[in-house]
Image (tube, helix red, strand yellow):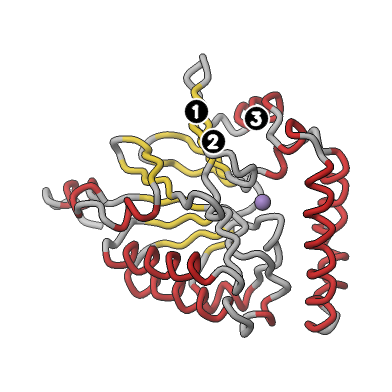
């Protein structure tokens, strides 16, 4: 990039966007349509970057699952960002942690690790899906370690897709039942874990999803934690630029005047 005088203005108008927990599925066509509109708008406005912090889809059973609806449509939408020059970063959620090289090649996405640190307009910012911070849920953390183990992953991906689809169907009903049994506090992040991980990465800002409890938490020491909204009840997008962070409904983002977008 050159340091031409008008370059600064151009950069200033650019935004970085965060979404998570869209849980796109063929059973919810309205959300898929909203997502397609959203991505088209992001491309049109040439945002600097879009970060998807996990649970983009309800289940990603491996990159060979890219033909089943709505995965094909999602890949096409994401791929359009590359043509517009928008950086795309995709993190793994607890529902979609099996993105691999074929997904990356098809979409142009960069995959985020469990914890990623970025410089967000001068603020050291930590990004994560959020499930790792729910440390009170000991059973889930144990389950997570097993399913995320490279050997488990390798063995799972080696099975026929139809078999994986049956397993996913069964796991989904199991998760819903177990979530009903768990009490409310266990499903949220643990503040001591938040403080520890932010200290480890020297982050002033933490952005995550997963808990479906959208909020902006400002701590006494100046740190901030932003919880992204899911797209089940209230779709949301976090719009960041060098003036700060704004949590918006997607419909509001779609209609923002160009100068603020
Ligand atoms: Mn999640």
Upstream in the sequence, badge 2 or badge 3?
A: 3
Residue in the picture at 56% in, 55% down: 232
Is 52 left or right of 40, judged from the image as shown? right
Residue in the picture at 27% in, 61% down: 45
In this rendering, the answer to whether 63 lies above or below 245 is below
From the Cβ of disc 3, is ligand 1 less than 8 Å away?
no
Mark 2 lies on residue: 206
Mark 3 lies on residue: 194
Is 147 left or right of 111, judged from the image as shown? right
Of 185 and 157, which appears nearest the observer?
185
Instruction: Count how many numbered circles sit on residues in the image.
Output: 3
Circles 1 and 2: CB distance less than 8 Å? yes
In this rendering, the answer to whether 74 lies above or below 86 is below
Q: Residues within 10 Å of mark 3 (few under 14, many from 20)?
A: some
Give coordinates of residue 20: x percent, y percent: 54, 53
Upstream in the sequence, badge 1 or badge 2?
A: 2
- Would you identify the image quadrant in which residue 134 lies? top right
Upstream in the sequence, badge 3 or badge 1?
A: 3
Mark 1 lies on residue: 224
From the Cβ of disc 2, is ligand 1 less than 8 Å away?
no
In this rendering, the answer to whether 123 lies above or below 191 is below
- Would you identify the image quadrant in which residue 130 lies? top right
Q: Pick the quarter of the image with the N terminus.
A: bottom left
> Residue at the top extreme?
220
Residue in the picture at 80% in, 55% down: 175
Circles 2 and 3: CB distance less than 8 Å? yes
In this rendering, the answer to whether 64 lies above or below 218 is below
- Badge 1 element: strand
- Badge 3 element: helix
Q: Residues within 10 Å of mark 1 (few under 14, many from 20)?
A: some
């Amino acid at each position: 990039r050159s340091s031409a005088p008008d370059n600064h203005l151009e950069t200033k108008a650019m935004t970085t966007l965060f979404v998570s927990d869209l849980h796109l599925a063929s059973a919810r066509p309205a959300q898929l349509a909203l997502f397609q509109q959203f991505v088209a708008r992001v491309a049109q406005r040439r945002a600097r970057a879009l970060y998807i912090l996990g649970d983009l889809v309800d289940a990603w059973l491996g990159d060979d699952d890219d033909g089943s609806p709505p995965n094909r449509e999602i890949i096409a939408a994401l791929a359009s960002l590359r043509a517009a020059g928008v950086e795309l970063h995709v993190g793994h959620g607890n529902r979609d942690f099996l993105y691999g090289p074929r997904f990356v090649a098809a979409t142009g996405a960069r995959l985020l690790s469990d914890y990623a640190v970025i410089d967000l307009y001068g603020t050291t910012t930590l990004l994560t899906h959020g499930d790792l911070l729910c440390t009170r849920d000991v059973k889930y953390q144990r389950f997570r370690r097993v399913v995320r183990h490279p050997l488990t992953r390798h063995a799972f991906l080696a099975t026929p897709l139809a078999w994986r689809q049956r397993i996913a169907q069964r796991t989904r009903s199991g998760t819903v039942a177990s979530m009903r049994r768990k009490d409310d506090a266990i499903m949220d992040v643990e503040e001591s874990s938040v403080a520890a991980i932010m200290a480890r990465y020297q982050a002033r800002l933490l952005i995550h999803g997963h808990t479906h409890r959208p909020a902006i938490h400002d701590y006494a020491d100046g740190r901030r934690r932003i919880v992204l909204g899911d797209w089940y009840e209230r779709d949301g997008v976090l719009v960041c630029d060098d003036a700060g962070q704004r949590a918006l409904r997607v419909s509001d983002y779609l209609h923002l005047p160009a100068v603020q977008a």
